[in-house]
Image: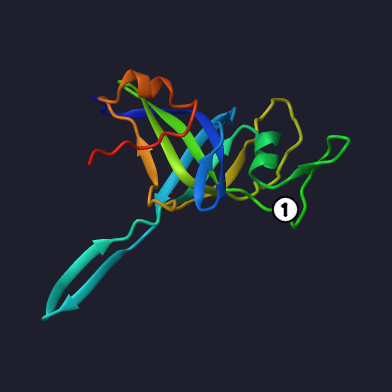
Amino acid sequence: MQKVKFGFKNAYYAKITEADGTITYGTPVKLNGAVSMSLAAAGELVQFYADDGLYFSDNSNNGYDGTLELALVPDDFKTDILGETLDTNKVLIENAIGVSNPFALLCEFTTDNGAKKFAFYNCIASRPELAATTKGETKEVSTETLNLTIRPNKEGLVKVSTTDQTSTEVVNKWYTEVYKPVVEG
């Protein structure tokens, strides 16, 4: 049984394409230099009063909002997801009319009993801020942070995560394709 988490690694993205209402996930691509991720639940408590009391109560699940911090945002992420392009000289171009693409985000937390792997199904990332400082007597590493908006996809899926009982086969294939839930019924 997993009791605590203390690490973050193996961030991958898989570009989403949609044709004729069908969502397809591309092959996951590694986001090297994963530093941290922080997500806050998005949604609100809905309360309806009738007969002089609380008659109905429910929580809405609108996914998550947060950040993904990387050593550097890779150029392939900038072209695949953020809508930047390369010119014929392989110079990266950020254009105000560039269109960003949704993606799935795969990652894992290190726990006291192995890895807990996650897939977030419908993510949008903002451009990272640009900042740098001059090098002094010591080197100080600067990172880049993407703001993330994670919403339910068309099927209502927000995220999935592995458990202690997840099969080794599923765990070992986690980063080869975006996991598709198998529901009995």
Measured as percent of width and height from the top left, residue 39 is found at 43, 46
Q: Residues within 10 Å of mark 1 (few under 14, many from 20)?
A: few
The image quarter containing residue 146 is top right
Q: Is residue 6 left or right of residue 142?
A: left
Measured as percent of width and height from the top left, residue 20 is found at 54, 52
Measured as percent of width and height from the top left, residue 78 is found at 68, 41
Tell me which residue sits at (15%, 72%) in the image: 54
Tell me which residue sits at (52%, 42%) in the image: 24
Tell me which residue sits at (37%, 59%) in the image: 43
Tell me which residue sits at (62%, 32%) in the image: 71
Q: Is residue 62 left or right of residue 163?
A: right
Compare residues 142 and 29 and report the one nearer the observer.
29
Numbered circles on residues, count: 1
Residue extending furthest front?
20
Instruction: Locate the N terminus by quadrant.
Output: top left
Instruction: Locate the C terminus by quadrant.
Output: top left
Colouring used for the render: rainbow
Residue extending furthest right?
89
Disc 1 residue type (three-letter): Gly
Measured as percent of width and height from the top left, residue 95 is found at 77, 52
> According to the image, label 1 marks what residue?
98
Q: Secondary structure at mark 1?
A: loop
Where is 17 relative to 170, above or below?
A: below
The image quarter containing residue 173 is top left
